[in-house]
Image (tube, rainbow, N blue to C red):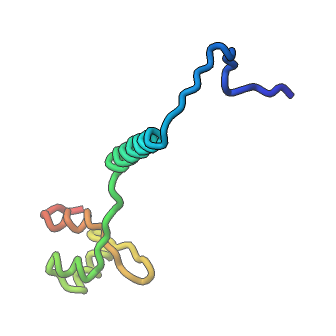
Amino acid sequence: MKRENCVPEVPASQMVLTIITDEQLEAFADAVITKYQQIIARRKAAEPSPEEWMTRKEVMALLKRCDSTMTKWARRGYLAPATVGGKHLYRKADVMHILNGGRQ
């Protein structure tokens, strides 16, 4: 099996050796880290934010509705909750849509 080099061969007469100080190496490392953090921040800003959820009590207080209304809305599909561990959770976007007068 033939082994290929990743680094092209350079004649010794063309090689350059650069000596850097600890401070220069540290500055280079800091620049690389800063650049990487900027890339990560841009990617996170471009991603949609994770959905926010509200508990049944929070929704009832915000919409000024009672428990039976919440049950009725869930049955009709008007504001259907997700049930996680026995708790009813509502997408904040859905609740805000109703709060702003919209129907789903």
Q: Is residue 49 visible?
A: yes
Kindly indicate the quadrant of the structure image that contains residue 71.
bottom left
Q: Residue at x 34, y 44 (%)?
A: 42
Q: Residue at x 20, y 62 (%)?
A: 97
Q: Quadrant of the N terminus?
A: top right
Q: Nearer the viewer, residue 40 or 13?
A: 13
Q: Residue at x 28, y 70 (%)?
A: 79
Kindly indicate the quadrant of the structure image that contains residue 86.
bottom left
Q: Is residue 93 above or below residue 84?
A: above
Q: Is residue 36 visible?
A: no
Q: Residue at x 31, y 75 (%)?
A: 74
Q: Nearer the viewer, residue 28 or 94?
A: 28
Q: Determine the residue located farthest toward the right in the rendered image.
A: 1
Q: Is residue 69 above or below residue 91?
A: below
Q: Nearer the viewer, residue 40 or 20?
A: 20
Q: Nearer the viewer, residue 71 or 18?
A: 18
Q: Using residue 54 as the reference point, say whether residue 13 is left or right of it.
A: right
Q: Using residue 72 as the reference point, say whether residue 28 is left or right of it.
A: right
Position of residue 104 measured from the top left corner of the image (x, y, whole percent): 24, 62
